[in-house]
Image (spheres, helix red, strand yellow):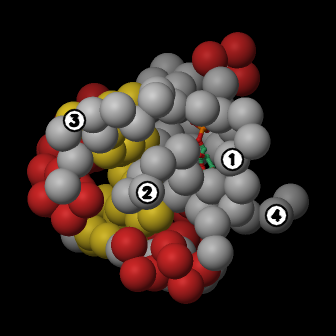
Amino acid sequence: MPECIFCAIGGHRSPAEIVYEDDETVAFMDIVPVAEGHCLVVPKAHARNVFDIALESAATTMRAAVRVAQAVKKATRADGMNVWQSSEEVAGQTVFHFHIHVVPRKNGDGGIRFAGRHRADPAALRAVA
Ligand code: 5GP
Ligand code: ZN
Protein backbone atom coordinates (compact mmCIF):
# COMPACT_ATOMS: atom_id res chain seq x y z
CA MET A 1 0.00 0.00 0.00
CA PRO A 2 1.45 3.45 -0.83
CA GLU A 3 2.37 5.60 2.14
CA CYS A 4 -0.08 8.29 3.28
CA ILE A 5 0.99 11.43 1.41
CA PHE A 6 0.77 13.77 4.41
CA CYS A 7 2.77 11.32 6.59
CA ALA A 8 5.39 11.34 3.82
CA ILE A 9 5.46 15.17 3.68
CA GLY A 10 5.67 15.41 7.50
CA GLY A 11 8.59 12.95 7.45
CA HIS A 12 10.34 14.78 4.58
CA ARG A 13 10.01 11.75 2.34
CA SER A 14 7.89 13.65 -0.16
CA PRO A 15 8.39 17.26 -1.28
CA ALA A 16 6.17 20.19 -0.31
CA GLU A 17 6.53 23.95 0.07
CA ILE A 18 6.78 23.98 3.86
CA VAL A 19 5.90 27.29 5.55
CA TYR A 20 5.94 26.19 9.21
CA GLU A 21 7.27 23.20 11.11
CA ASP A 22 7.80 22.03 14.69
CA ASP A 23 8.24 18.60 16.29
CA GLU A 24 4.55 17.73 16.02
CA THR A 25 3.23 19.81 13.14
CA VAL A 26 3.98 20.77 9.57
CA ALA A 27 2.27 23.38 7.37
CA PHE A 28 2.71 23.60 3.61
CA MET A 29 1.18 25.10 0.51
CA ASP A 30 -1.86 23.31 -0.92
CA ILE A 31 -0.85 22.00 -4.34
CA VAL A 32 -4.28 22.86 -5.80
CA PRO A 33 -5.02 26.14 -4.03
CA VAL A 34 -8.46 27.77 -3.91
CA ALA A 35 -6.74 31.11 -3.23
CA GLU A 36 -3.18 32.41 -3.34
CA GLY A 37 -1.64 31.49 0.02
CA HIS A 38 -3.87 28.44 0.69
CA CYS A 39 -2.00 26.30 3.27
CA LEU A 40 -2.62 23.02 5.04
CA VAL A 41 -1.68 22.50 8.68
CA VAL A 42 -1.05 18.86 9.51
CA PRO A 43 -0.09 16.83 12.60
CA LYS A 44 2.94 14.63 11.98
CA ALA A 45 1.22 11.78 13.85
CA HIS A 46 -1.27 10.11 11.53
CA ALA A 47 -4.99 10.43 12.27
CA ARG A 48 -7.72 9.98 9.68
CA ASN A 49 -9.88 12.94 10.70
CA VAL A 50 -11.80 14.55 13.55
CA PHE A 51 -13.28 11.19 14.57
CA ASP A 52 -10.03 9.53 15.62
CA ILE A 53 -7.51 12.32 16.29
CA ALA A 54 -6.21 12.55 19.88
CA LEU A 55 -7.48 15.72 21.58
CA GLU A 56 -3.93 16.82 22.39
CA SER A 57 -2.87 16.42 18.76
CA ALA A 58 -5.95 18.36 17.59
CA ALA A 59 -5.17 21.16 20.04
CA THR A 60 -1.52 21.30 18.97
CA THR A 61 -2.52 21.39 15.30
CA MET A 62 -5.05 24.17 15.92
CA ARG A 63 -2.45 26.22 17.79
CA ALA A 64 -0.18 25.92 14.76
CA ALA A 65 -3.08 26.78 12.43
CA VAL A 66 -3.70 30.04 14.31
CA ARG A 67 -0.04 31.00 13.99
CA VAL A 68 0.00 30.06 10.30
CA ALA A 69 -3.23 32.01 9.66
CA GLN A 70 -1.73 35.11 11.28
CA ALA A 71 1.43 34.78 9.19
CA VAL A 72 -0.54 34.15 5.99
CA LYS A 73 -2.67 37.24 6.68
CA LYS A 74 0.48 39.35 6.86
CA ALA A 75 2.17 37.72 3.86
CA THR A 76 -0.82 37.95 1.55
CA ARG A 77 -2.32 41.15 3.01
CA ALA A 78 -5.57 39.25 3.43
CA ASP A 79 -8.72 40.95 4.70
CA GLY A 80 -10.01 37.70 6.24
CA MET A 81 -9.37 33.98 6.49
CA ASN A 82 -11.27 30.72 6.20
CA VAL A 83 -9.97 28.02 8.55
CA TRP A 84 -11.68 24.64 8.07
CA GLN A 85 -11.37 20.89 8.38
CA SER A 86 -13.34 18.24 6.46
CA SER A 87 -14.01 14.77 7.88
CA GLU A 88 -15.07 11.88 5.61
CA GLU A 89 -15.95 11.84 1.96
CA VAL A 90 -19.49 13.16 2.39
CA ALA A 91 -17.97 16.32 3.93
CA GLY A 92 -15.46 16.75 1.11
CA GLN A 93 -12.41 15.03 2.64
CA THR A 94 -10.13 13.71 -0.10
CA VAL A 95 -6.87 13.14 1.82
CA PHE A 96 -7.46 10.89 4.80
CA HIS A 97 -4.86 12.36 7.14
CA PHE A 98 -6.26 15.10 9.40
CA HIS A 99 -5.51 18.60 8.08
CA ILE A 100 -6.72 22.14 8.65
CA HIS A 101 -7.14 24.41 5.63
CA VAL A 102 -6.02 28.04 5.97
CA VAL A 103 -7.37 30.13 3.11
CA PRO A 104 -6.77 33.89 2.88
CA ARG A 105 -9.71 35.98 1.68
CA LYS A 106 -9.76 39.41 0.12
CA ASN A 107 -12.57 41.90 -0.17
CA GLY A 108 -14.17 41.41 -3.59
CA ASP A 109 -12.49 38.03 -4.27
CA GLY A 110 -15.84 36.63 -5.42
CA GLY A 111 -15.87 33.70 -3.00
CA ILE A 112 -14.16 30.31 -2.93
CA ARG A 113 -14.69 28.15 -6.01
CA PHE A 114 -13.68 24.49 -5.98
CA ALA A 115 -14.65 23.78 -9.59
CA GLY A 116 -12.02 24.58 -12.19
CA ARG A 117 -9.10 24.92 -9.79
CA HIS A 118 -5.85 23.49 -11.08
CA ARG A 119 -2.48 22.28 -9.84
CA ALA A 120 -0.34 25.32 -9.07
CA ASP A 121 2.86 26.00 -10.96
CA PRO A 122 5.63 24.87 -8.55
CA ALA A 123 7.63 28.08 -9.00
CA ALA A 124 4.57 30.22 -8.25
CA LEU A 125 3.83 28.13 -5.16
CA ARG A 126 7.43 28.54 -3.95
CA ALA A 127 7.25 32.31 -4.45
CA VAL A 128 4.07 32.58 -2.38
CA ALA A 129 5.48 30.22 0.30
P1 5GP B 1 -9.55 17.82 1.68
O1 5GP B 1 -10.38 17.81 0.42
O2 5GP B 1 -9.21 16.40 2.13
O3 5GP B 1 -10.15 18.65 2.78
O4 5GP B 1 -8.22 18.56 1.31
C1 5GP B 1 -7.12 17.93 0.74
C2 5GP B 1 -6.26 19.01 0.15
O5 5GP B 1 -4.96 18.49 -0.05
C3 5GP B 1 -6.76 19.50 -1.22
O6 5GP B 1 -7.00 20.90 -1.16
C4 5GP B 1 -5.62 19.13 -2.17
O7 5GP B 1 -5.40 20.11 -3.14
C5 5GP B 1 -4.44 18.98 -1.24
N1 5GP B 1 -3.46 18.00 -1.67
C6 5GP B 1 -3.70 16.72 -2.12
N2 5GP B 1 -2.56 16.08 -2.38
C7 5GP B 1 -1.55 16.95 -2.09
C8 5GP B 1 -0.12 16.84 -2.18
O8 5GP B 1 0.46 15.82 -2.56
N3 5GP B 1 0.60 17.94 -1.81
C9 5GP B 1 -0.01 19.09 -1.38
N4 5GP B 1 0.79 20.11 -1.06
N5 5GP B 1 -1.35 19.22 -1.29
C10 5GP B 1 -2.12 18.16 -1.64
ZN1 ZN C 1 -0.83 10.04 7.36
Task: Point out the frontmost of discs 4 and 3.
Answer: 3
Task: Point out the frontmost of discs 4 and 1.
Answer: 1
- For marks 2 and 3, the one nearer the N-term is 2
Q: Is mark 1 within 8 Å of ligand 1?
A: yes
Q: Nearer the viewer, residue 73 or 28?
A: 73
Quarter of the figure that contains the C terminus? bottom left
The residue pinned by badge 1 equals 117
- In the picture as drawn, the residue positioned furthest to the top comes out as 90
The residue pinned by badge 3 equals 80
- For marks 4 and 1, the one nearer the N-term is 4
Determine which of the numbered discs, if any, sits on residue 2 in the image.
4
Q: Is residue 52 visible?
A: no
Q: Is mark 3 within 8 Å of ligand 1?
A: no
Q: Which residue is located at x 38 percent, y 72 percent?
A: 128
The residue pinned by badge 2 equals 36
Q: Secondary structure at mark 1?
A: loop
Instruction: Say what amino acid the circle numbered 2 marks.
Output: Glu
Q: Secondary structure at mark 4?
A: loop
**Badge 1, how many Cα within 10 Å: few under 14, some, many 20+?**
few
**Residue 95, quarter of picture:** top right
Q: Position of residue 69 (x, y in %)?
A: 21, 48
Q: Secondary structure at mark 3?
A: strand
Circles 4 and 3 in contact, beta carbons < 8 Å:
no
Q: Nearer the viewer, residue 24 or 14?
A: 14
- In the picture as drawn, the residue positioned furthest to the front comes out as 108
Left-right relation of 37 to 125: left
Task: Point out the frontmost of discs 2 and 4.
Answer: 2
- Compared to 57, does 22 lie above or below? below
- For marks 2 and 4, the one nearer the N-term is 4
